[in-house]
Image (cartoon, grey):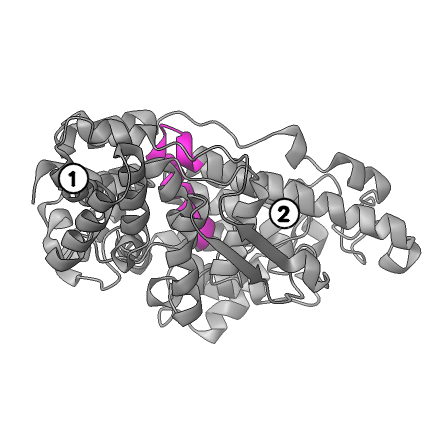
């Protein structure tokens, strides 16, 4: 495996893919990793006026706290809004989420803090949450972003106190008289220790510990002592008058939590098939470090086995990784950013809209006959060399449900009169000094992580040499390589 291949592998797994000048620099993987860690040290919240949703909140203000009422429900109920008010409110909710989505995609594609972006993306799926309040969704996102490389117990506690998560998992309704077990169950099953390491009685006792955890009308965590069950509880074999913080502490004191988290991180960053020989030492070091996330990923990316052939070009890119990678590697992105949201929906992964609390399943679940065809068409559409018509399925949980078919249809007609050609300047610079008959191989080495069969390379090379000058040849080669099944792997 060449140094360039190792660097590309690292940049795909620790970020969202290499740019041409990243490989042209010729740095060794260890130096690239040091730079990734350095660039990830700073935290910049995701924010913009378009993400703030102020007008819709003014239209239907959040009420003052009433334990009989969900503080996320608008003061005016759905039936009390006029049709025009309801339409305007839904539009502003949708536009705020779209601004958050495309703003984050742009950050993924351009930020030097690739490792922070990738870990934020990982935790976004780990702590999957779906609410209709954009401001609370953005608040949760920035909490995750801020603590993404810190100590996991700090991240866990902060996320557990986020109003978006408390609302999504029904802990606002968890009170001393009527315990609700949903939040406690998911904290154990999906966020920390995993199935098989706790009992149903542990769930009941943990739910009692989380009673009184809620939030106010301004979207801030609030503990309500009168709603809290302060009696003795027995949880994971220990007894005390535990509160929510105690439950989280007891969970992270268990080595099973370190193993559960390390396995999930390994499957995301290394291979869908866990290797116990690799994971065991990492999990032990993670536990002993106090769950230091940065230390764990640094150990992972520094391991010799990280660059084994079995771990390179073997993971299927998620839709988000595919879309962002096309922009980073080849500068391919639609002029209308909202089309990126449409492509996410069509391919099955929309930021801020996980399918359920377990997040996106990933792996081979990303690919079926329909989604693979769309994936292979996407580069040619972005290069304006192909047209496509896609109608999204109706989704009752969508930000804009019950849209007519005309508004769920994406039409891309390829290159039209007056369209400026898509610039491939950065890719062109990579092969500027490469002989024409060697360019296809050089481009394949940069764009693909999986080996390309010689007959496919020869076909791409021959076709390009027969058509047009250097620019057209480059466009044909890049388009053909990005449209191969091999490009779906990283």
Q: Name the residue under label 1.
A: 442
- Magenta highlight range: 108-125
Residue 288, visible in the rendered structure:
no
- Callout 2: helix, strand or loop? helix
Q: Image quadrant of residue 454?
A: bottom left
Q: Which residue is drawn at 29% across and 43% down?
A: 478
Residue 487 vertical position relative to residue 135 in the rendered view, above or below: below
Q: Which of 363 and 130 is in front in this view?
A: 363
Of the residues under marks 1 and 2, which one precedes in the sequence?
Answer: 2
**Which numbered tag is attached to residue 481?**
none
Image point 31% across, 38% down: which residue? 472
Question: Residue at label 2?
Answer: 163
Left or right of 71 in this view: 309: left
Q: Is residue 110 magenta?
A: yes
Q: Please rate how many residues cluster around mark 2, counting C-alpha atoms within 10 Å: few if below 14, some from 14 to 19, many from 20.
A: many
Residue in front for this viewpoint, 16 or 325: 325
Q: Where is residue 335 in the image (x, y as percent from the top left)?
A: 53, 37
- What is the C-alpha distance between the residues marked 1 and 2? 50 Å
Judged from this view, the residue extending furthest toward the left is: 1
Q: Is the magenta stretch mostly helix, strand or loop?
A: helix
The percent position of residue 37, horizontal first and vertical second, equals 28, 30
Q: Is 58 rendered above or below residue 86? A: above
Q: Is residue 233 magenta?
A: no
Residue 111 pos. (x, y %): 40, 29
Q: Nearer the viewer, mark 1 or mark 2?
A: 1
In the image, taking residue 178 as reference, residue 290 lies left or right, namely: left
Residue 404, horizontal then vertical, whole percent = 73, 62
Point 15% across, 48% down: residue: 306
Nearest to the observer: residue 475 or residue 148: 475
Splitting the image into 4 quarters, where does residue 331 fall? top left
């Amino acid at each position: 495996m060449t140094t360039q291949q190792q660097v590309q592998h690292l940049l795909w797994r620790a970020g969202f893919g290499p740019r041409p000048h990243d490989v042209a620099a010729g740095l060794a993987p260890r130096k690239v990793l040091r730079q990734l860690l350095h660039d990830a040290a700073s935290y910049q919240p995701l924010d913009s006026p378009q993400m703030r949703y102020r007008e819709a909140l003014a239209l239907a203000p959040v009420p003052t706290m009433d334990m009989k009422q969900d503080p996320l429900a608008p003061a005016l109920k759905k039936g009390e809004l006029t049709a025009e008010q309801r339409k305007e409110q839904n539009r502003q909710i949708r536009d705020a989420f779209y601004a958050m989505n495309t703003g984050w995609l742009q950050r993924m594609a351009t930020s030097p803090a690739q490792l922070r972006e990738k870990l934020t993306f990982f935790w976004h799926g780990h702590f999957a949450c779906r609410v209709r309040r954009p401001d609370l969704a953005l608040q949760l996102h920035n909490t995750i972003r801020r603590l993404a490389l810190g100590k996991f117990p700090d991240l866990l506690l902060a996320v557990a106190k986020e109003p978006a998560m408390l609302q999504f998992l029904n802990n606002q309704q968890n009170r001393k008289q009527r315990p609700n077990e949903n939040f406690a169950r998911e904290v154990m099953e999906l966020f920390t220790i995993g199935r098989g390491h706790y009992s149903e009685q542990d769930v009941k006792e943990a739910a009692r510990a989380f009673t009184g955890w809620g939030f106010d009308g301004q979207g801030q965590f609030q503990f309500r002592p009168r709603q809290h069950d302060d009696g003795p509880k027995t949880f994971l074999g220990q007894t005390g008058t535990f509160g929510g913080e105690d439950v989280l502490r007891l969970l992270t004191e268990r080595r099973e939590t370190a193993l559960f988290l390390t396995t999930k991180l390994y499957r995301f960053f290394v291979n869908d098939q866990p290797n116990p020989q690799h994971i065991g030492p990492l999990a032990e070091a993670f536990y002993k470090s106090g769950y230091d996330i940065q230390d764990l990923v640094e150990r992972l990316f520094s391991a010799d086995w990280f660059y084994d052939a079995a771990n390179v070009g073997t993971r299927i890119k998620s839709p988000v990784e595919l879309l962002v990678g096309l922009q980073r590697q080849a500068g391919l992105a639609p002029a209308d950013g909202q089309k990126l949201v449409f492509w996410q929906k069509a391919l099955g992964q929309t930021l801020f809209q996980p399918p359920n609390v377990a997040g996106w399943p990933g792996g081979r679940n990303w690919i079926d006959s329909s989604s693979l065809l769309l994936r292979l068409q996407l580069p040619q559409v972005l290069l304006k060399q192909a047209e496509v018509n896609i109608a999204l399925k109706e989704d009752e949980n969508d930000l804009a449900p019950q849209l007519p078919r005309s508004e769920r249809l994406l039409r891309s007609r390829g290159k039209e009169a007056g369209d400026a050609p898509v610039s491939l300047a950065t890719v062109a610079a990579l092969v500027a000094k490469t002989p024409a008959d060697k360019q296809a191989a050089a481009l394949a080495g940069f764009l693909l992580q999986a080996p390309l069969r010689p007959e496919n390379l020869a076909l791409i090379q021959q076709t390009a040499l027969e058509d047009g000058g250097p620019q057209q040849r480059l466009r044909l080669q890049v388009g053909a390589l990005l449209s191969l099944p091999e490009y779906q792997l990283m």
